[in-house]
Amino acid sequence: MSAVTEEIETAPRDRLSRARTLHGVLAGALVLACIASLEIGATDVTLTAMLAKLVQGEALSQVERVVLLDIRLPRLAMGVLVGAALAVSGAAMQGLFRNPLADPGIVGVGAGAGLGAILAIVLGALLPAWVIDQTGNQLTPFAAFLGGWGSTILLYRVSTRHGRTSVATMLLAGIALGALAGALSGILVYIADDRQLRDLTFWGLGSLAGASWAKVLSAGPLIVLSIGAAMMLGRGLNGLALGEATAAHIGIDVQRMKSIAILAVAGATGAAVAVSGGIGFIGIVVPHLLRLASGPDHRTLLLNSALLGAILLILADVIARVVIAPAELPIGIVTAVLGAPVFLWILLKRRGLVEL
Amino acid sequence: MSLVAQDIHVSYGQRVALRGVSLTARPGEVTAIVGPNGSGKSTLLGAITAALPFQGRVSLNGQDVAMLKPWDLAAQRAVLPQASRLAFPFTAIEVVRLGLQSGTAGDRPEVPMQALTRVGLAHYANRTFQELSGGEAQRVMLARVLAQVWAPVENGQPRWLLLDEPVSSLDIAHQLQVMEIARGFARAGGGVIAVMHDLNLTALYADSVAVLADGQRLAFGTPAEVLTDETLSRAYGCNLRVSAPPPPGTPFVLPHAATV
């Protein structure tokens, strides 16, 4: 072997700077996806046509204003928030549980939120009239958020003894709690009428169709705050890959990091599920793709997950809107149909790397 | 400026693992902890590294360990665990850089590669950790630990390497390599505490030895003082004979001469 090839082989590959370049690439792609999302829809109103009008000094029609400002823009904003929330939560959970197949569902958000939503849909009409008047069609998202957040806090309490949270206990207790929530949901499904069953099914499949500025404003701050908190976990999650004891030995306050991670995931996922229902696959596929592209370093993985999660959810929503226009598909179907084969393909192709 | 453990008690539920063990390790020396399986060696190291709850007092360079923040401790001492599993496909060099993040050599990006070279694995820098053999993985972890406390003395204070069975999965050449690295760190002014299984390597490389048995300290002193027929036979519960080869006079234990 010549000295030159030896040199090349021993030079440490720099995946970190590749991951940092990816920040810029993904940010650019997100802008393009946003433009596409504003351009394409069930009506033939397009962003380019509107921009052309504005450039020529013409006023926009009432329909164009409504479609752009009250329909597509809030839907886009919600897509960005929900996509980023699900993907970052997935990356954080996988780091915390040291398992690339973990997803936010593990901490009970999914089961709890599902139970909350089903309670609201099936039993919501039994509430006192003034409550129904106050909440209106926000009752289901509100109940979903309370259910998701509540079950996470309950799990966290159960798994924490003497100030130390056992991640293994949390995983197992999460399975038990999920089964319990599933049973309660089953009872409610049993007594539900046909219209309620239909609502339940659609809620479970997820959709951005109900997007409004009111929803963006109610879920947005919590999602932004939670994602911001998760962004500070990069170094700690890297250390945790070595195990909890070693993470502490290299100077990480492990308990504080676990608390931040769990609360951030509960906040981000709880709010996302509340406004958009159950959207699968983003939380698992996005961090996986990024680990294959630029390595598992969480200092860059978390931000890249937020960007790619937002991109994929926006594009999935565009597909959901146009494929059977003027009706639209639940977005959870699109993410599953696109996500599952890609996921399987990666697993088969790169079996060695994703073995763990 | 030493590492002092005073009157350490540790219990796992009903089982008492350590009953009042004390130990003083000085910088510039390799201090070995030996003893039979279950004697409390790793538990003692766990207490010293504050990885498990204990009663007693541990001070590092004159400061009570219980009062120090994790990052303050990480700047002064690095810990090599017995076995390491890694959750994601980090490469060898990325694992070593994790050590650099927490130490005080963070502004010296060349350190991880030097540390990998030190353990003889520079050519595996880009291999993922999961592709490495057990012994190679153990040496990559040693490189990570070295990167964390790269300078054995900093700001006039010794830094510490705490090693839990550092040679357990290594062949004889790499056992010697790792012990040489530990001794080199000590000779440069740092402190080393190593939990050891191999009595001959202990005799060759340790400056002082603590013998534990049944959660208590049976003996503490230089290898020549401690590695005696009587002490070892009592500690390990079998009849051991310590011998010395003619020229350097280092004691050695020959399993051939033992009777159970």
Image (spheres, coloured by chain):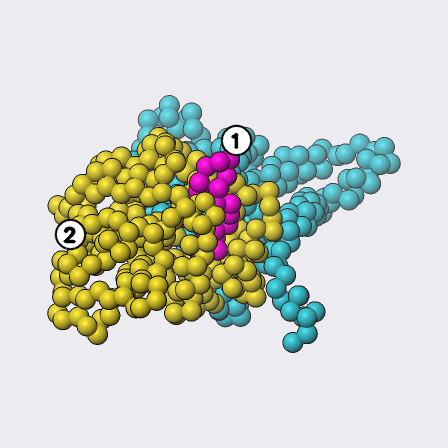
Chain colours: A cyan, B yellow
Q: Judge from the rendering whether residue A5 lies leftward or rightward of residue B49; answer left or right.
A: right
Where does the image place residue B118, in percent across and percent down from the top left? 52, 59
Q: In the rendering, at what x and y percent does residue B137 appear?
A: 44, 62
Residue picked out by circle 1: A221
Numbered disc 1: secondary structure: helix
Tell me if residue B183 comes above or below residue A299 in the rendering: below
Amino acid type, label 1: Pro
| Host chain of mark 1 | A
- Which quadrant holds the C terminus of chain B? bottom left
Q: Tell me residue A218's x, y (percent).
A: 50, 30
Q: Residue visible at 43% across and 49% down?
A: B186
Which residue is at 17% across, 56% downward? B231
A253 displayed left or right of B18: right
Q: Secondary structure at mark 2?
A: loop
Residue annotated with mark 2 = B214
Quarter location, residue B67: top left
